Image: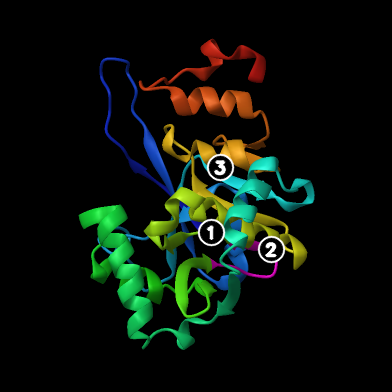
Amino acid sequence: MKIFFSEASPDYSSYTFPYAVYCLQENQNEMSAIYERGFLPYSDPQVLVSKEGIYYYLARSVRVNLSHFSLTSENRRVRRKMDVLNPTMEILAKEDLIHDADFWSFCEDYAAKRIGEEMPPARLRYIFEREILNRIFKFSSGNRILGYVWSPSNDEILHYWFAFFDTELMHAGIGKWMMEQVISYAQTNGFRYVYLGTCYGTKPMYKIRDFKGIEYFDGNLWRTDLSFLKSKCKETGVFIDDFKRFPERF
């Protein structure tokens, strides 16, 4: 792997001159080590596209340590609501879906409704073609498609990268249910970690609240002090000196 830095926007008012941190994955065997160091894969075809390998960015990412995962009361509540549909889960390879018109229609419709213009069909295709994406979870109820999860994975880790689901079932908590199902599958099948993406702002705080075994990357280490993470997610401003604000952590 290659780790490198690129200048980010400076803030002269506070004399902050930051550098963003990136990583280039040069072979598949580096995947676990790259995620372990806090990196997540780019999904934008306009940013860091290379034939040399896959680019990653460093961020406050969140993962589930599966040795500490167990169902919460919220997980069980959502399971009960979804159980009335008698849902099933399949794990498919990309080759099984690349020419499936129903699959593409479902994912594109969800992206248009829930993500918007940031996720046009061309970007979906780009993500789907990334070599690290090798596992698709399909959830169904009879002939009804409930959702899909796109996941890069190897023998140790699984990344819950993109999820697409039937928005008519949002009241039942289908999004949280699909995440729990994937996490439970990974635990049962001997994975070490499930990575859940970034955690900034209040929108993704369900990841912290509703799942056990959560760890987050703070730029240096993986930590489990979730009260601190919650306080960071609730911040609306930019704070550059955590040492002064939270000296007990250093």
Corner quadrant of residue 103: bottom left
Indicate the amino acid at tag 2. Answer: Ala
- The magenta-colored residue range is 152-158
Residue 63 is situated, as x and y percent measured from the top left of the image, at 61, 48
Q: Secondary structure at mark 2?
A: helix
Nearer the observer, 118 or 218: 118
- Up-down: is 209 above or below 5? above
Q: Nearer the viewer, residue 243 or 85?
A: 85
What residue would you read off at disc 2?
186
Mark 1 vs mark 3: give the one in front: 3
Which one is earlier in the sequence, the residue at label 1 or at label 2?
Answer: 1
Q: Residue 191 at what x, y percent from top left?
A: 72, 63
Q: Residue at x 53, y 59 (%)?
A: 160
Image coordinates of residue 235 in percent, x first then y, are: 42, 22
Instruction: Give amino acid for label 1.
Output: Tyr
Classed neighbour count for the residue bearing mark 3: other residues with Cα under 10 Å, few (<14), some (14–19), many (≥20): some
* Residue at the extreme left of the image, as rendered: 117
The residue nearer to you, when weighing 33 against 1, is 33
The 10 Å Cα crowd at callout 2, few under 14, some 14 to 19, many 20 or more, is some
Q: Is residue 23 magenta?
A: no
**Residue holding disc 3:** 207
Q: Is residue 168 above or below residue 143?
A: above
Q: Is residue 187 left or right of residue 165?
A: right
10 Å crowding of disc 1: few (<14), some (14-19), many (20+): many
Q: CA distance from mark 1 to mark 3?
A: 12 Å
Tag shown at residue 160 = 1
Query: Left or right: 60 with respect to 68?
Result: left
